[in-house]
Amino acid sequence: MTSSAQIRAVPVAAQQPPWDAHPDIGPVRQTLTVLPELVRPWEIRSLLAALARVERGAALLLHVGECAELFSMASPTHIDRRLLLYRRLADRLAERSGREVVLLARMAGQHAKPRSQPYETLPDGSRVLTYRGDAVNGVACSAGERAPEPARLLESYGRSHRTLDYLRRHHYLGRPLFVSHEALLRDYEEPLTRDHGVRYAASAHLVWIGDRTRGAVDWHINWAASIANPVAVKLGPTTEAHELTEIVRTLNCPPVPGRLGLIARMGVGHTDRLRALTGAVSTLDAAALWVCDPMHGNTIRAGERKTRLLRDMRAEITAFVAILGAAGIHPAGLHLEVTPDQVRECGADQPDADPGDAPPCDPRLNPDQATTIIDHFAAELAARALTTEEGRSS
């Protein structure tokens, strides 16, 4: 496991806000170091054990939530509505698959987003910094709102704490509940890394590293190697087999059951890339959960708006299950961006003619659409199991 001294020596952290020279960044980091942990080591170990069952094929993972969690979502009403949807989807997957489902929410800290462009051009031709999540700047299209503000890291912590406190008091009810976010901001994650004999990220039960920040020699992967939490890495179509081999060696050699998730987000036109990646991992003394994100690789433009089509998501899921099945690997689950609101941000076979208000970040599935995707995944698993059984008996 990488030491904290080695982490400090790693200079490159991609996708960071331009606030290094801000006078508040040092005091904000110092404050975060003394705030209470958001999650507890025993909760993290409980998730690790649950993910080990997923890795063995005894359970499935449903990793689900908002694309960008707004600070305003830390209210009881918002929390209740989201969690009700997430649990309904998990129950649906359990019913359709006949397996236990481990529910992992993108919740209580999904406040930062990597972006492909640093600036956004407004209709009047002016430019503002791109919205990078409420932990960095505001969503409103003005220069003042889009200015990166380190104090937002403390607000992110506060909203996450409020959400987790409410969840613990009202929603455990004997059912395990785990939260996660993309570990993007070095100035947030480092101060919230705590030592209990082993190092833990105290910001979430599981953290993931995005496709834009997965460089094997960069800060994000090296920091993730230093913690005992389960971690995941998103893999887009540009991922090379040798890069993935190095990532897996860094994060999970020797292997710890349930420790590493690999979230494939290839896009429907690039699913064949999975064959080389699964083959590369199979040669290692390592283990991983392979999860399908059918949304991020299938983002398209419809005029000035981003959208995603259920047709493409279903096709990617079908290819994912088939490729993993042919390689003798359990498809571990789904990673979806959803909202309890009846939005029309994603279309069925073509972009919605009236998509309504733009989302804060990327297009999300509404409850009916999310159910459709869950059902398709379960049907593909069942079809694959039937094919495998017929092959054994022939």
Image: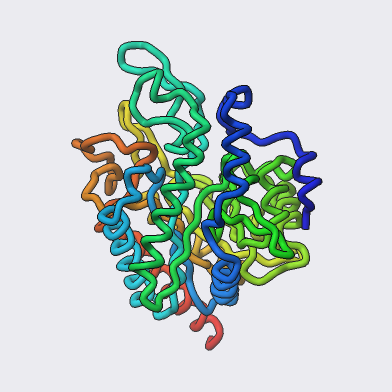
Residue at 38% x, 63% y: name it. 167
In this rendering, position of residue 45 left or right of residue 79: right
* Colour treatment of the image: rainbow
Q: Is residue 175 above or below residue 186?
A: below
Residue situated in front as seen by the camera: 55 or 283: 55
Indicate the position of residue 350 as horizontal and vertical percent values.
Answer: 28, 42
What residue sits 56% from the left and 65% below the top?
A: 40
Classify residue 155 by image quadrant.
top left
Q: Which residue does the image show at 52% across and 57% down from the upper left?
A: 38
Q: Is residue 291 above or below residue 119?
A: below
Relative to 56, say whether 314 is above or below. Answer: above
Question: Against 40, is 218 above or below?
Answer: above
Residue 381 seen by the camera: yes
Q: At which x and y percent is residue 382?
A: 42, 75
The residue closer to the viewer here, 180 or 276, is: 180
Give me the residue at 69% from left, 51% from top: 244
- Say which quarter of the image contains residue 279: bottom right
Provide residue 51's location: percent of width, then percent of height.
56, 70
Residue at the outermost top position: 125
Which quadrant would the N terminus be assigned to in this image?
bottom right
Q: Count the marks: how many? A: 0
Image coordinates of residue 357 in percent, x first then y, are 24, 35
Q: Quadrant of residue 103?
A: bottom left
Whether residue 309 is visible, yes or no, is no
